[in-house]
Amino acid sequence: MSDLSKTGLIITVGANPPQRLDKALATHAPEASALSRSRLVRLIEGGQVRRLGGDVVTALKTKAVAGEQWVVAMPPTDDINARPENIPLDVLFEDDDVIVVNKAAGMVVHPAPGSPNGTLVNALLHHCGDLLSGFGGRARPGIVHRIDKDTSGVLVVAKSDLAHQRLAGQFADHSIERHYRAVVYGVPSRGDPRLAGLSGVAFEPGNITRISGNIARHKTDRKRMTVVRDAGSHAITRCKVMQEFGAGTAALIFAFIEVGVRFDAEIFSLLLMNIMVLLLNKISLNKGGVT
């Protein structure tokens, strides 16, 4: 159950909730609030969630208790009113419920401070008119998931509210598979001495490298992400080398995300190699593994 008060959205945790707070609140939040687990993670980490009558909680591992009430402050999302712009789109599929587009590198997904126009949403509004899900507000209509500005890839955008709800649920329960290709400097392999004993890195049959750890906003540069030990969001990415270049100078890897709330193939490729993924320059890593 939930209701909206002057202090924010009040969510009552139901019976047999998931143990983690972000998962429990996402499970019991009203559909109309469009509160995905990824957004709740950001709100919790940003100090926007507190127990009713209690203190603010910022740890995602906080245990959820049935019957407990939580207040979620809802920062305004409609400060920016996206407008249609005639920007070409690479449409892969479209019906009455969804549109699947191949986002080009260099394009921001939705308007935000510093990027008020020229975004994928501006292009979608021109292409679809008012036939986009309204759950994302005026700034993010139809947007269920995102990838970074400098990353190209396929995005599924909701045109109907029902599609938005169903897609958000599939991302939340990880029933959607996400695959990526990335170029890394160096070739990840079991024999690489830089990977020996590196926390979060394991090797599996089939030449598969498994990378796990937690990611969060950098403490001083909020536009960057970093690998952390006891905070942030847990994610697991597996990758496989598809092609080597320059006698081991670089490699094309195929990455598939098992668990994650964002496009973490970038940061885990970086964690894997302790070096920068080519063309991806907004990730931070503490040398020597997860810190």
Image (cartoon, grey):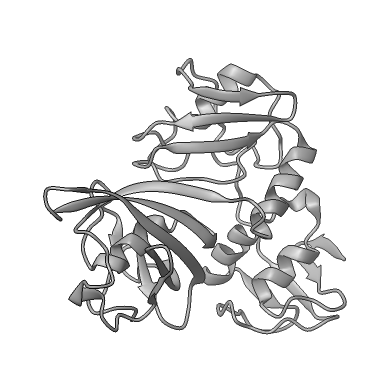
Residue at 71% in and 36% down:
134
Query: In the depicted view, which residue is nearer to us: 207 or 58?
Result: 207
Relative placement, left or right, of 289 versus 118 is left
Residue depicted at x 48% and y 73%: 232
Extreme-front residue of the structure: 206
Query: Residue 260's x, y, as percent?
Result: 53, 62
Residue 7 showing in the rendered view: no
Residue 141, quarter of the rendered image: top right
Give whichever of 45, 200 is nearer the camera: 200
- Given residues 204 and 232, the one toward you in this image is 204
Is residue 121 rendered to the left or right of residue 69? left
Seen in the image, is 133 located left or right of residue 17? left
How many numbered dots are placed on residues in this image?
0
Residue 147 visible in the current orientation: yes
Q: In this view, does 65 lie above or below 253?
A: below
151 with respect to 55 (left or right): left
Q: Name the residue rendered at 53%, 50% in the picture.
A: 178
Between 253 and 115, which is closer to the camera in this rendering?
253
Residue sitting at x 63%, y 51%:
176
Q: Position of residue 221 (x, y in %)?
A: 31, 63
The quadrant of the rendering that contains the C terminus is bottom left
Measured as percent of width and height from the top left, residue 181 is found at: 38, 46
- Where residue 205 appears, as percent x and y from the top left, is 43, 68
The quarter of the picture where residue 27 lies is bottom right
Q: Quadrant of the N terminus?
A: bottom right
